[in-house]
Image (spheres, rainbow, N blue to C red):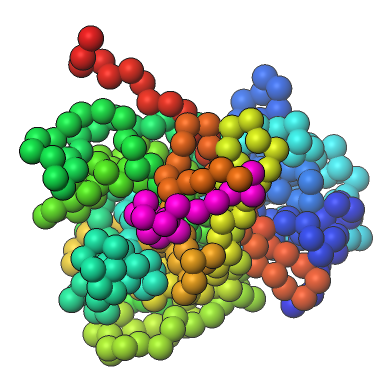
């Protein structure tokens, strides 16, 4: 596939993250207007609510876009998703008869505010990055051995939908309980080992009933699109609380997602298979279709007051061991119902070398090997005022499918309200 041309000139460059090939879905407002659905094209946003009101877009199911979320579109299912994408493509394509009518429905992205693009119904975070799992094993248990279940199960834990925020939302350093290995008693206070996790988020578009197992083929059909996801992590809180039930407060204070839902259809040319299996998977997890995507991922860090940005990581989503469809199938197979707006975190994405690691825990080897930023500062963990940016791009022949940055800045912890 090559670049599809639009009459929106800024969309026709190989470097634009939002060419006609992409058309990601977001929620925006301009000035005092109410937030509503929009589609990114070049450096503009196409106003879907106004397009619907003007009769340019009519999906024959009632109003869908004059709301601050895409869940109503998701619920309509894959046939409507395809028809909608075809209609928006026709409106914005070079030579479209709708150009004159659509021209006034464009707003510059630079002047718009972006919001969560969907209502998160539930949030589950997986652990499907093999290099990350091996690194964590080496750091925490002294060897790169994977947990006994890891090559057989896409393991995960149930997170909190209420913790998910859109890019740009500041992240407050959490307070919590922690205990150093040599301390006699636990203590309460601000997290000192604040971290990121570079992940992708898959958004479930259509649900399935409780007690209704689904195949990986069906699971793939149910996925509406993908976002970048930063699973902010408090390693000292996590380290004390996690046995035996897994992450809890150490993961519940903030999970950032990028503001545009990149549809599965836009990513179709970039499908790639899961890596070779060490152990054959049980039949219910077999994939009939390549379930991962070739998406280049980067992590950038900028300390407060510094003009210097440091690129910490470059890796790729195709490094995961399990696809989102396999994770969704495993989730539902035991009887768990899934709902539109369910968010599935991939797990931390790390490549084989230090410049490909998806968390500071790995980059600084749990504080033992601090790393140096371009500004000269050293880091093992996040400091107050640090801004972290995740970036994702799938690169085609003369075009790019971008996600829009996933950004978060660390605010200092609140004063401990329990001591004077
Ligand atoms: Ca995670």
Query: Residue visible at 39% across and 32% down?
Result: 173
Query: Residue visible at 71% across and 28% down?
Result: 30
Quarter of the picture containing the N terminus is bottom right
Farthest-out residue, top? 420
Q: Position of residue 208 (x, y in %)?
A: 31, 61
Q: Is residue 65 visible to us here?
A: no
> Residue 366 lies in magenta, yes or no?
yes
Q: Is residue 257 above or below residue 413?
A: below
- In the image, taking residue 126 as reference, residue 377 lies left or right, namely right
- In the image, taking residue 185 as reference, residue 400 lies left or right, namely right
> Residue 189 lies in magenta, yes or no?
no
Quarter of the picture containing the C terminus is top left
Query: Residue visible at 59% across and 59% down?
Result: 298
Q: Which residues are magenta?
A: 361-375
Q: Position of residue 15 (x, y in %)?
A: 79, 60
In front here: 200 or 413?
Answer: 413
In front here: 169 or 234?
Answer: 234
Q: Is residue 246 above or below residue 143?
A: above
Q: Is residue 42 above or below residue 142?
A: above
Q: Is residue 237 visible to us here?
A: yes
Q: Is residue 47 above or below residue 223?
A: above
In front here: 321 or 24?
Answer: 321
Q: Position of residue 345 (x, y in %)?
A: 39, 57
Main secondary structure type of the part rendered in magenta: loop
């Amino acid at each position: 596939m090559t670049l599809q041309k639009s009459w929106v000139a800024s969309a026709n460059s190989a470097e634009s993250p939002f060419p006609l090939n992409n058309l990601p879905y977001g929620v925006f407002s301009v000035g005092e207007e109410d937030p509503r659905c929009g589609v990114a094209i070049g450096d503009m946003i196409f106003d879907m609510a106004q397009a619907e009101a003007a009769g340019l877009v009519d999906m024959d199911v009632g109003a869908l876009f004059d709301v601050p979320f895409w869940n109503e579109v998701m619920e309509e299912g894959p046939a409507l998703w395809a028809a909608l994408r075809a209609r928006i493509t026709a409106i914005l394509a070079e030579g479209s008869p709708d150009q004159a009518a659509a021209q006034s429905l464009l707003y510059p992205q630079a002047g718009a505010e972006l919001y969560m693009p969907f209502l998160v119904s539930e949030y589950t975070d997986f652990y499907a990055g093999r290099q990350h799992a091996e690194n964590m094993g080496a750091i925490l248990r002294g060897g790169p051995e994977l947990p006994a279940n890891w090559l057989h199960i896409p393991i995960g834990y149930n997170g909190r939908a209420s913790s998910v925020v859109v890019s740009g939302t500041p992240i407050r350093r959490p307070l919590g309980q922690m205990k150093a290995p040599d301390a006699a008693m636990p203590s309460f206070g601000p997290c000192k080992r604040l971290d990121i996790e570079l992940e992708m988020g898959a958004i479930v578009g259509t649900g399935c009933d409780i007690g209704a197992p689904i195949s990986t083929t069906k699971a793939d059909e149910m996925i509406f699109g993908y976002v970048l996801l930063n699973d902010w992590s408090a390693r000292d809180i996590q380290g004390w609380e996690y046995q035996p039930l897994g992450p809890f407060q150490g993961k519940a204070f903030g999970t950032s997602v990028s503001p545009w839902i990149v549809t599965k259809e836009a990513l179709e040319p970039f499908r790639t298979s899961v890596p070779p299996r060490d152990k054959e998977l049980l039949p219910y997890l077999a994939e009939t279709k390549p379930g991962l995507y070739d998406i280049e991922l980067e992590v950038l860090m900028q300390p407060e007051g510094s003009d210097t940005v440091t690129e910490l990581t470059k890796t790729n989503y195709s490094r995961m061991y399990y696809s989102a469809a396999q994770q969704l199938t495993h989730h539902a197979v035991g009887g768990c119902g899934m709902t539109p707006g369910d968010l599935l975190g991939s797990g931390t994405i790390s490549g084989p070398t230090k410049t490909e690691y998806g968390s500071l825990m790995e980059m600084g080897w749990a504080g033992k090997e601090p790393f140096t930023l371009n500004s000269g500062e050293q880091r093992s963990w996040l400091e107050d005022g640090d801004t972290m940016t995740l970036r994702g791009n799938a690169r085609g022949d003369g075009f790019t499918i971008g996600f829009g940055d996933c950004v978060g800045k660390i605010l200092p912890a609140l004063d401990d309200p329990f001591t004077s």
